[in-house]
Amino acid sequence: MNRYLLAAVVACTFTWASYSHAELLYVNDFEGEALGSVPSGWQKVWDGSTTASVIADPVAGGNQVLASSDLAHDASRHDVGGSIYGVGDATWTDYVVQYDALYPTDFYIGTLFRYQDDTNFYLLDRRSAGELGTFTFYHHDGGWNALDSGTFDTEPMEWYRFRLSVQGDTFEVRAGLAADDPDLSNTDPFATGTDAALANGVFALYGLIYIDNVIIGETGVDISAAVEPHGKLATTWASLRR
Ligand SMILES: [Ca+2]
């Protein structure tokens, strides 16, 4: 091989390797975590009265998941004294998060993104009561500022797969069943939102929610590459850190 061609091939190989690994930010199916522990990569980002831990899946035997709280649904949100647990780096700006969510009860429960502190974050909230079936994006700045909403029906004690994309001032979320569309690449967003108040922050949990199969990447391509066709994760958090 011509030495210039060889140099080009080597350069491309190294570029691809660093590119492909740099953009997958976090992955965890919680199978390698001790029951009762706060899983690797997660930390308490708001110090309230509740504790998150890895638990046995209440629906599917032999599976481990992350429970956001050890108290009841109506004692878990930070506005009633609960803690907030998050994963990631405070400098994160744009990212895509795929996760499976189970809502233990019919209540206002959500996930947070660009979380900075207790009065600076975005919430994707599963609404309840008269708004059941609706998910609403909020910007929290001490008050609750509703952004846009969309509809996706969820039953308590059922697993659903979500894919939340945060790019610049634009947010979108897709949802479905993991068995139907493992990376949700064939599913259209059911809610979109636009807001420019917060540029960075971690991904976090709000209220009493169970999650599993968390993948965070910079783009949707990273997510698709990390999911096998049957819906399981193709890599582990331990291997990603090596
Ligand atoms: Ca799991």
Image: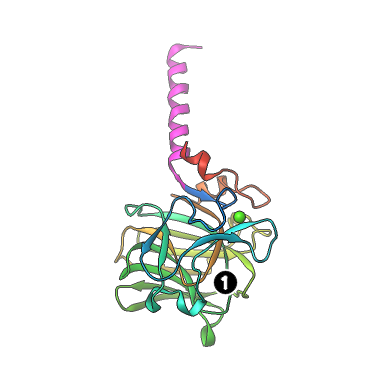
Q: Is residue 133 left or right of residue 12?
A: right
Residues in magenta, as a range: 1-25
Give the x, y percent position of residue 50: 44, 69
Give yes or no for residue 8 being in the magenta stretch.
yes
How packed mark 1 is, by other alpha carbons closer than 10 Å (few <14, some 14-19, many 20 or more), is many
Residue plotted at (57% across, 56% down): 35
Residue drawn at point x = 69 percent, y = 62 percent: 60
Q: Which secondary structure class fits the magenta region best? A: helix
- Between residue 195 and residue 26, name the one nearer to us: 26
In the image, farthest residue toward the right: 61
Relative image position of residue 102 (x, y in whole percent): 59, 68
Q: Amino acid at mark 1?
A: Tyr
Secondary structure beneath dot 1 equals: loop
Q: Is residue 145 above or below residue 216?
A: below
Residue 175, percent across and down? 57, 65
For residue 148, which quarter of the picture?
A: bottom left
- Viewer-side residue, 155 vs 174: 155
The percent coordinates of residue 204 (x first, y second) are 43, 62
Q: Residue at x 39, y 73 (%)?
A: 78
Where residue 133 sits, quadrant-wise, is: bottom right
Q: Is residue 121 left or right of residue 109?
A: left
Position of 191 compared to 231: left or right?
left
Q: Residue furthest bottom?
A: 130
- The answer to whether residue 147 is magenta is no
Label total for image: 1
The quarter of the rendering in which ligand 1 is drawn is bottom right
Disc 1 marks which residue? 103
| Residue at disc 1, CB closer than 8 Å to ligand 1 | no
